[in-house]
Image: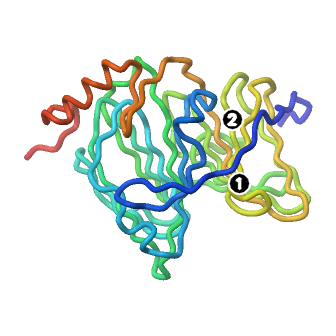
């Protein structure tokens, strides 16, 4: 790793805010509609974390998506899911569900929690470029034991969902926006440095430790990020991706480039013609 490479400055820091989504799920909105396009190609990041089943058990009943990818990463508890491609199953602790909605998918996600009632995880939305908005939907289920964890020379432990650390590659590959998604645990008194691609959007979200709930957005200049743990250990998600620099028309679970494309999507949903590819045979 070229530690002499220019280190990016932090452009902005803010804290997540409580909100309610789905059928009444209490969660923390890290960023969303009001923060775009500064996190391009990323649209939204939610943290759902509670020891109270009433906060999450109502879940996210059947709803459509088009034009985006949704990435669900669970740390504790179970999430049952089902979709119009015929997929169904349970996202368990350490698992990732990487769903490309593309031309359209209808699904539901119902958090069940752990035996102790705890639910903890994240959902990230990544935009798709105009040329891929109407691509065939696809679904990737990545199990806990498929995600490599490496120990860096600095003492950090890194789970690599997508991207590369040293010679180790994460299991999720061939994504349009060329993202990296790392789960980094850093001991007190240590600094984690990581080379990122020039011009790519990079942010870090503190999961545990000092500054918990804070998100740091980095300046686009420079090709290295550095995160330090001072007196206490820290755990954070480090995410990067290639900006699309395209117009965004966004309403609810559908993100297109124009308002007319949005209107078409919702008309098709109401008419029952929303699903274009991959619908299971009846």
Q: Which mark is residue 206?
A: 1
Is residue 27 left or right of 66 when viewed as pictured? right
Q: Quadrant of the N terminus?
A: top right
- Neighbor class of circle 1 (other Cα within 10 Å; few <14, some 14-19, many 20+) is many
Is residue 15 left or right of 257 when viewed as pictured? right
| Residue furthest to the left | 282
Report x, y in % for residue 145: 53, 61
Report x, y in % for residue 48: 52, 60
Image point 59% across, 24% down: which residue? 243
Q: How is the image coloured?
A: rainbow
Report x, y in % for residue 218: 75, 34
Is residue 76 left or right of 278 when viewed as pictured? right
Image point 77% across, 60% down: which residue? 234
Report x, y in % for residue 4: 92, 31
Cα gap from disc 1 to disc 2, whole angstroms: 14 Å
Whether residue 21 is visible: yes
Location of residue 180 by image quarter: top right
Q: Secondary structure at mark 1?
A: strand
| In the depicted structure, whether residue 12 falls above or below residue 96 | above
Q: Which mark is residue 202?
A: 2
- Observer-nearest residue: 208 or 181? 208
Q: Which mark is residue 262?
A: none
Dot 1 and dot 2 residues touching (CB under 8 Å): no
| In the depicted structure, whether residue 159 falls above or below residue 13 | below
Is residue 262 left or right of 43 when viewed as pictured? left
- Observer-nearest residue: 142 or 135? 135
- Neighbor class of circle 2 (other Cα within 10 Å; few <14, some 14-19, many 20+) is many
| In the depicted structure, whether residue 77 falls above or below residue 244 | below
Whether residue 145 is visible: no
Q: Secondary structure at mark 2?
A: strand
Image point 45% across, 81% down: which residue? 115
């Amino acid at each position: 790793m070229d530690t002499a490479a220019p280190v990016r400055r932090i452009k902005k820091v803010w804290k997540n805010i409580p909100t309610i989504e789905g059928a009444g799920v209490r969660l923390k909105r890290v960023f969303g509609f009001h923060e775009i396009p500064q996190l391009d190609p990323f649209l939204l990041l939610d943290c759902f974390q509670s020891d109270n089943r009433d906060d999450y058990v109502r879940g996210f009943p059947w709803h459509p998506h088009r034009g985006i990818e949704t990435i669900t990463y669970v740390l504790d508890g179970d999430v049952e899911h089902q979709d119009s491609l015929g997929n169904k199953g349970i996202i368990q602790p350490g698992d990732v569900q990487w769903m490309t909605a593309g031309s359209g998918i209808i699904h539901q996600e119902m958090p069940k929690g752990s035996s102790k009632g705890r639910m903890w995880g994240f959902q990230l939305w990544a935009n798709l470029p105009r040329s891929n908005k109407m691509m065939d939907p696809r679904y990737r289920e990545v199990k806990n034991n498929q995600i490599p964890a490496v120990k860096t020379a600095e003492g950090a432990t890194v789970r690599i969902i997508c991207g590369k650390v040293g010679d180790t590659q994460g299991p999720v590959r061939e994504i349009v926006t060329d993202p990296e998604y790392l789960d980094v645990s850093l001991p007190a008194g240590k600094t984690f440095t990581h080379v990122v691609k020039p011009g790519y959007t990079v942010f870090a979200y503190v999961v545990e430790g000092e500054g918990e709930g804070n998100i740091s957005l980095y300046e686009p200049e420079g090709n290295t990020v550095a995160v330090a743990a001072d007196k206490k250990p820290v755990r954070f998600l480090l995410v990067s991706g290639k900006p699309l620099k395209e117009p965004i028309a966004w309403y609810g679970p559908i993100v297109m480039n124009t308002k007319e494309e949005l209107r078409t999507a919702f008309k098709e949903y109401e008419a029952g013609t929303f699903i274009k590819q991959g619908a299971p045979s009846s």
